Amino acid sequence: MKLKMKLKTFAKVGIFVAAIAAAIIIPITAIAGYEPANRPTKTYTGPDSVAFQYPVFNSWVNTPNYGDERAFFDASTQANGGTSGNYQDQIVVTPGQEVTLRMYVHNGAAPGLNGNNFDGPGVARNTRLQVYLPTATATQLRSFGYIVADNTNPGWVADSADFTSSVPFNMSYVPGSAKMINGANPNGIALSDNIIQSDASFNVNRPGAPIGYKNMDGNYPSCFEYSGFVTLKVKINGPQLAVSKKVTTPGSTNWQENLDYNFNDSSAAPTTSWLIEYKNNGAATATNAVVRDNLPANLKLVPGSVMNYDSNHPQGIAVSDTGLFSGGVGVGSVPVGANGYFRFRTTLATPFKADECGTKQIVNNAQLEASGVSAINDTASITAKKDINCAKPPTPPEPPTPPTPVNPTPVGPTNPVSASLPQAGVEVGLLGVIGSSAMTIGAIKYKQSKNALAQALKRK
């Protein structure tokens, strides 16, 4: 097995118990790290190392299969119930995780003291385990593991494991998860749920969960070959935030996730009421919780309408107009199961242009967060409608497309006219006669005008 050295840095309280002869009750707060811190130990140097001559648990140092046995109790978020998986004495946890706790168990007496049938003086009798789980809710918690027997010296040994988180948390045992894993039970054998105790003090007389080698009968033999691990699971519980957003008309208690509003309805009031509920459904108090709201552009706050309701202010308390919508309002700690409300009113401005119609969604978002808890959101909306007074002006006709210019065809020189007149029909001949007559008449008229001119000159 892999060598494992575990060092504890906590203060030690020197308590040595020679044997259990009466009830031993020790405040849990008196134990940190492994105890008894000053109990006798043996250092392993090889197979010939001299063992204890009486039954004793987890008092060997430098063992090849574990290291320092006094630091026998640790935890892992990765092991998932197995014996390996980054076990540590101090781990960081997150609400919702399942953590495996692990205890190493070894009776350090000489193997020759086991007897023929585990009836020798080296066998630990009425051996049982206890695991203390804290009941508090905090950002730092400590758990303890105890190995107890009637005839060991000391009569009990203990070790601790620490858990830290960025948010307050608590721990709860997963019933039925405890098991013993050893050579006789490599897949694990179930242990009693009595292994868990949550009182503020360790009482050696509690029954615990009996363990053994093959059978869980309380008889635990000595020698490394009989060593084993006990694992069990615990759940890390923290705050679990919830936020809900609703809307309605003023004066109505019919809160809805969506409200219809018709801008063509002259009787519809443009004012709306909004409700934000915040709640802690988890197992630990949420601290420094903040609620905020993101108003869309079409919603305008009615001044003085923001109110906060919670167990301290059942009748409501006024909140500034700006706080909820710019950065949020701090509501402090929200205990397990506690809730509160914010209420406010808005007026609704149309999201439509003059020539638009149809429907538009106006969404309002609420948000809740707390220390170490991521922000969560919820929305409510208004479905705005408009179906008249939205005619668009006529679209002007498009101008006609100008014709494509045609390139002129160049004209070449013409052939000379033939001297010969073309042959013609009757019409052409007739025209020729008429033309010839006209020429004759013209000559006569010209001669007459010339004679008249000569006579006029004579008179002058």
Image (tube, rainbow, N blue to C red):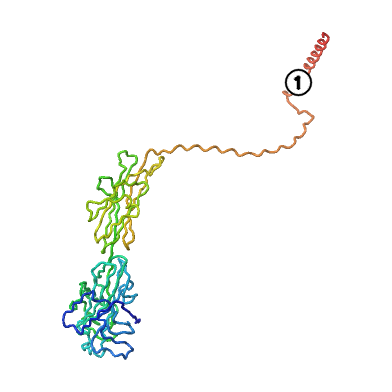
Q: How many marks?
A: 1
Rendered position, 108 above or below 170? below
Quarter of the rendering occupied by the N terminus: bottom left
Residue on which disc 1 sits: 435
Query: For the residue marked with disc 1, what is the amino acid?
Result: Gly
How far across and how far down the image is residue 70, in percent?
28, 81
Rendered position, 320 above or below 354? below
Residue at the extreme right? 458
Quarter of the rendering occupied by the C terminus: top right
Q: Is residue 148 left or right of residue 420?
A: left
Residue at the extreme left? 22
Q: Nearest the camera: 124 or 118?
A: 124
Q: Is residue 397 visible?
A: yes
| Quadrant of residue 224 within the rendered picture | bottom left
| Quadrant of residue 443 within the rendered picture | top right
Categorize mark 1 by other alpha carbons within 10 Å: few (<14), some (14-19), many (20+).
Answer: few
Rendered position, 448 above or below 21? above
How far across and how far down the image is residue 114, in percent?
23, 88
How far across and how far down the image is residue 405, in percent?
62, 39
Residue at x 31%, y 75% (from the top left corner): 89
Q: Nearest the camera: 387 or 165?
A: 165
Find numbered disc 1 in the image and state the secondary structure of the residue it sits on: helix
Q: Nearest the camera: 158 or 222?
A: 158
How far across and how far down the image is residue 429, in percent?
75, 23
Q: Is residue 207 visible?
A: no
| Quadrant of residue 12 within the rendered picture | bottom left
Residue at x 59%, y 38% (from the top left corner): 403
Residue at x 74%, y 26% (from the top left corner): 424
